[in-house]
Image (cartoon, rainbow, N blue to C red):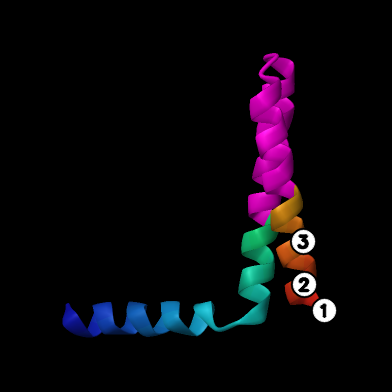
Amino acid sequence: MEVALVGIGLAGLLLVVQRWFWIIVFFVAGTASLFAMLASIIHFQILGALGFMFLMFISYAFMNAIAE
């Protein structure tokens, strides 16, 4: 059991230091923010939509900065 937990921890540590992993993470976060923004617009929650828009821009900016 302990060996499996150490193996999972090492695999997680290996992923954290990979560049492609963070590009995928920020892409998924930006896309989720995009869909939440669209849902907020549909439900007339404009301040929530603005917050999700800024979160989307920040996520995509981080993704682009890491990719370059």
Proximity of marks 1 and 2: CB atoms separated by less than 8 Å = yes
Q: Residue at x 60, y 82 (%)?
A: 18
Amino acid type at circle 1 is Glu
> Which residue is drawn at the image coordinates 67% and 14% (left, top)?
43
Amino acid marked by disc 2: Ala
Tell me if 19 is positioned left or right of 13 in this view: right
Question: Would residue 37 be counted in the magenta stretch?
Answer: yes
Q: Nearer the viewer, residue 9 or 61?
A: 61
Stretch in magenta = 28-56
Q: Which residue is mark 1?
A: 68
Q: What kind of residue is marked 3?
A: Ala
Chief secondary structure of the magenta portion: helix
Nearest the viewer among 11 and 40 is 40
Q: Which residue is mark 2?
A: 65
Comparing 5 with 68, the one in front is 68
Quarter holding the C terminus is bottom right
User: Compared to 59, does 6 lie above or below?
Assistant: below
Please name the residue shown 27% across and 84% down the image: 6
Question: Is 34 placed above or below 41 here?
Answer: below
| Residue denoted by label 3 | 61
Q: Is residue 36 left or right of residue 65?
A: left
The image quadrant that residue 50 belongs to is top right
Q: Report if the CB atoms under discs 1 and 3 are less than 8 Å apart.
A: no
Disc 2 + disc 3, Cβ < 8 Å: yes
- Alpha carbon distance from label 1 to label 3: 11 Å
Secondary structure state at the residue bearing disc 3:
helix
**Where's residue 15, x and y in %?**
52, 78
Q: How many marks?
A: 3
Residue 19 image point, x, y percent: 66, 80
What's the residue at 72%, 47% (across, down)?
Answer: 56
Check disc 2: other Cα within 10 Å, few if <14, some if 14-19, many if 20+. few
- Labelled disc at residue 37: none
